[in-house]
Structure formats: C-alpha cells, structure tokens
Image (cartoon, grey):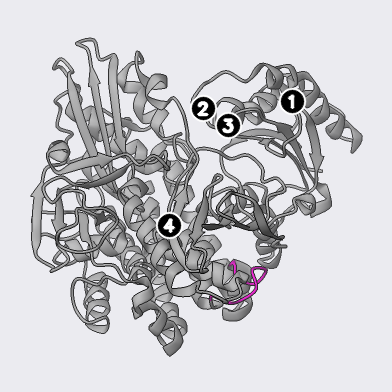
Amino acid sequence: MKTLILGLGNPILRDDSVGLRVAQEVEHLIPANPDVEVGLDYWGGLRLMERMIGFDRAIIIDAICTGASPGTIHLLNPDDIPTQRSSSAHDVNLSTALELGYQAGAHLPPSKDILLIGVEAADVQTFDEALSPEVEDALPAAVEAVMTALTHNGDAP
Amino acid sequence: MKRISIDPITRLEGHGKIDIFLTEDGEVANAYLQVPELRGFEQFCVDRPAEDMPNITNRICGVCPEAHHLASTKALDALFHVDPPPTAKKLREMFYSIFFATDHTTHFYALGGPDFVMGPNAHPSERNILGVIKKVGMDIAGKVLKMRHDGHHLIKMIGGRPVHPNWGLPGGVSRGITEEQREEIEALGRDAIEFAKFSLQLFNDVVLGNTDYVSLITGGLFTHETYNMGTVDENNHVNFYDGMIRVVGPDGKEFAKYDAKDYQEHIAERVEPWSYLKFPYLKKVGWKGFVDGMESGVYKATPLSRLNAADGLATPLAQAEYERMFDTLGGKPVNHTLATHWARLVELLYATERWVELATDSEITGEEFRVLPTETPDEGVGSVEAPRGTLTHHYWTDERGILTKVNLIVGTTNNNAAINMSVKKAAQGLITKDVEIKEGLLNTIEMAFRAYDPCMACATHTLPGQMPLEVTLRAPDGEVIEHLAQNLD
C-alpha cells in the first residue's frame, strides 16, 4: 500500500507551519521505506489532489481553525469538512478536487483512505517562524497521531 | 442602518467577507470588502540579507509565488546595480509565461468560469469545475489537469522546486536549461497553445453565444470607468515580465508612462479606517473617493486593464483575439468588469505563444545566465505583472545588503478601491426594498469582485472549518434581525 504523508502549510506564518513541522519530525522517525513517502507542500485543493496521484493512502497534516482550544488534534476525512469553501482564492476545495480526479480516472486514494490530521491553530496571520506555545506543545501528540495512523493500517515502520 | 454580511466569501482565501449596509428603507447605503490582516511582514524581513527575499516573498502568497519570486529577484538586480545577461532575462520570462498560462487556466476553469458556464444562479454544488465538466464534457477535465501538470512540471524543472522557486539571483538565475529540456518545454508549449485556443472557443460558444451572459457582461451593473494600468514593451505591447508601467485614462488616452522605480511619484496609498488593506491611487489625479471618471485617481490593474493600457499583443494569435474582443465590446477601453474573464483567456493565449517563442529563441540555452554583482547595494525596485495586477517590490539596505526597509504593492491592492466600488454598485443594483435575498443574488454580487481574482490573505492554508456562507441582517444598533447560514454542500 503506497502511502503519502504530507505536511501542509506556510513556514513563515506562525501556526500555519505546524503541518510542516509534524511531517519533518515523522520523517526522522520512520526508516526508509519505498512504500512510504513523506513530503511537504503548501497548497490545498487541486494541487493537493494532484500531489496524491499514484498513492493508495494519504495522511495529511495541516493547521485548522475551528474555534477549539489551540493545539487540539482533529482527525478528519475529506467528507467531514462541512463546507464548500475553499482555502484558496484560486482553487476548489479538497472534496471537489478529489471528485475531479476520480472522474478523470486518476489513481488516487479512495476518500476513506485519506486521513486529515488538523492541529488547531492559535494564530495564522502573523509572519513568524515560531509556533504559538500551545501548538508547539501539541507537536508530540500530532506526530503520535501520524504514527498511529501509519501503523494501524499495517504499514508499521 | 441594517447590515448584510456575506462571510466568508465562497472560494476566496482567508476570512474576507462582504458587509452590505442597508438603510432603514432597505436600500443599499454602502458595501465593503473586508479583508484579514496579515501582520508583521516588514518586521519579519528587516535585518535579514536582501538575497533571502526571493525565497521569503514567494511564501507571502500561495497562489502566485512565481510572481513574487521574480519581482523580488528584479528588485535585487536593481539593489545590487547589475543587469542580467540576455539568456537570463529570456529564461525568466519563459518561466514566467509558463506560470501565467498555468495560473490563468486554473482561474478560468476553477473560479471565474463556472459563473458563466453554469450561470450565476446555478446551485453552488454545480457552480464549480465539476459542473463545468458535466455540462461541457469529461474531456475537459483531462485537458485542464494536463495543462496544470505540464505547467507545474516545467516550473519545477526550470525553477528548482515545485512550488516556491529558488532560482532567481541578483544578476541572473542559478542555472540554465539543456537542449533536451528546451525541446520538452517547446513541445509542451505547443500543446498549451492548442489548449488556450480551445479555451477561447469554449468561451465563445458558451458565453458569447448566450445573449443573457453578454447582457450581464455589458450591462451597467458591472461597469466602471477608471484608469487602467499595465506593463508594456517598447512597442506598447503587453509584457508580463518587464517594461514600462503605462496608465491609460477612462478616455483611452495615455495618462502616464514610467519606469517602475519611479512608482512613488505616480502612486500614493490611502488608508481607510475600516480596511487593513491600503487603497493605492494615481497621485497626479488625486483621491476623490470611491468614484469613477477622469477626475478620480482610482485605477485598475487586471488582465482587462493590461489590454486596455496597451496598444496590442506581441504574438499573432493573441493579437487577433485581442482585436476580436475590442471589436465585439465596442472598442477601447472596455470598462465592463466581467470582460476581465475574456481578457484573461486572451492573455492565456499570449502567454502560451510567448512561451514557445522564447523556447525557440537561439539564446535560451546559452550558458551565460548570470552576472556577478560587484556594486554596493543601497535601494532597489522590481516590478512584474502578476496575474492579478502590477506587483512592485521595493527594498532598502545598508552597505552590507542587510534590509532596513521593505515596501510591497501587490496585484490585488492596486484594485482595492475598484473592487469595493464594483461590490457596492452590484449590491445597489440588486438589493432593493422587498427583494428577497437569495444565494443566487449574493453570488451575482460576488461575481463583481471574483472577476478581479482577488488574493487577499494570500499566505494561509489552514483547513477550512465550519464556515458556511452567512448572511446577517443587522439593525442600526447591531442587533441581529435575521441570520441566514447556508451550508454550501
């Protein structure tokens, strides 16, 4: 089962970088495995869908803003995201992008095999390379969530 | 005064929202596009080496990192007083043409186009790229995905990284291209020209073939007579990468033509208490408020503005489409905001033709792609046409090249006043006493600014939370009279 672990975010926009930080830590924890690729990216929507082409499963880590306490870990499926609102001025949302990919016949993970790990952000509007303290403190739990998800489906490192 | 809030704007990044203030009589008194504030950019940059800027500024925006990368690289050329060799300039422009073609494709098919192909009153679940496919045919999905894939592939190949290029250097670029790479760039560019022609044909058949849409485009609801800005070459043809900034008046006559480094002589920025985003205007005309006309310093810098501000396009197929557009819409300048979508497709064709033109240039595989800077840095301005308008970077450093001050005018900011005027005019035309406010109506108002392809909070990429479209009617004291929350699923 070819798996993509992808951290999303902007490295210079405070808590928006949390997905990148988690993916970087996960990369150090898992031994080289041709069936598991760890990557960093900056785009949602169409670009995210295109990044998942060729994989059977994806674990995506990103900052999320739901109003929960900063640092809260959310485990979501693309179908759980309750709005058509895109996170980009220039894009469509993930479920629309995935549907486009499926319709076009692209080899993509089925929706049930895409796990979105959202780390609740405190501030995604300030230019800064550091995370807010509550989000920094949540890094181990977010890394653990990725490792659990990876192991749970039989691809133990 | 009642207030209607559209929050957030569907398919717009960040937490931008429209506030429409109603009078007691139910008429629109005012309408504002509110944007989120990204804080601390200048402080983040100051005290860093200027050479870091192309790799920092390309992260300001998740939509057009290539535009920031090149504006920043050109600012470094000026800062270090170095003129890149011809091969470097051509490589940069070719790279940029590929980016432009990819970017305009995405906007038309994913964002702006669905309003026309599906119609402004279509249900949101259909008014997207999936709806377009359903209506036009599955074939189009493959074409759009191939166009995007080819563009991203070449941007990575030339620029060094898939999204945020790390290629531009003061005096040139970090590497050139091989003959084998050139052949691939040319071949994919020829495919891209065909795709652009197909897209214009689609616009012709679906949009121009529908008299309702043509009426919508040319109607007064979406028309504003402002100044137009764009970058032009020595023949006054549009150029995305380099040239002089030309401003043409509502009467179609040239008002100003200047080097980007002199932008502060021509552009001033106004601050309004209700917006974090500044409002640039033409200094020599002056700020007269959010109004049209020769006497108002409001200007636009959009694909349509670029075509209005130029005398033509430098490639043959795009020039023919340029002439057809202006002939159809009654000559220059065209002031219909929604015609920006058409202009974007004309630019798409130009970008693809320019891509191939440069890929077949004898100097493009040259090995002299950088001149080492030797002068002491002090101050530099770099400018390109971003897809959303003229993008200007201005840096000041000490003699070691450490940044002391940074100023940016991004594409969307140029259009800030015009966007607000467009939203207000559409709202005034559509919302009147006793009119029921429905999603389709709000979408038509959104179309007024979607044409500008605005990019407000361009750096955030958090997952969307539970934020459906919201409409709030408020009494003058702020009390909520009615709250409509429409989940767009």
Q: How many marks?
A: 4
Q: Quadrant of the C terminus of chain B?
A: bottom right
> Image quarter for residue B472?
bottom right
Vertical order, B28 against A48 (above or below): below
Q: Which mark is residue A124?
A: 3
Amino acid at circle 4: Asp
Amino acid at circle 1: Gly
- The residue wearing badge 4 is B453
Residue nearest the viewer, comparing B457 with B367: B457
Determine the secondary structure under disc 4.
Answer: loop
Determine the secondary structure under disc 2.
Answer: loop
For mark 4, name the chain.
B
Q: Which residues are magenta?
A: B120-128
Amino acid at circle 3: Val
Determine the secondary structure under disc 1.
Answer: loop
Q: Are discs 2 and 4 located on one and the same chain?
A: no
Q: Residue B124 in magenta?
A: yes
- Where residue B386 appears, as percent x and y from the top left, is 33, 49
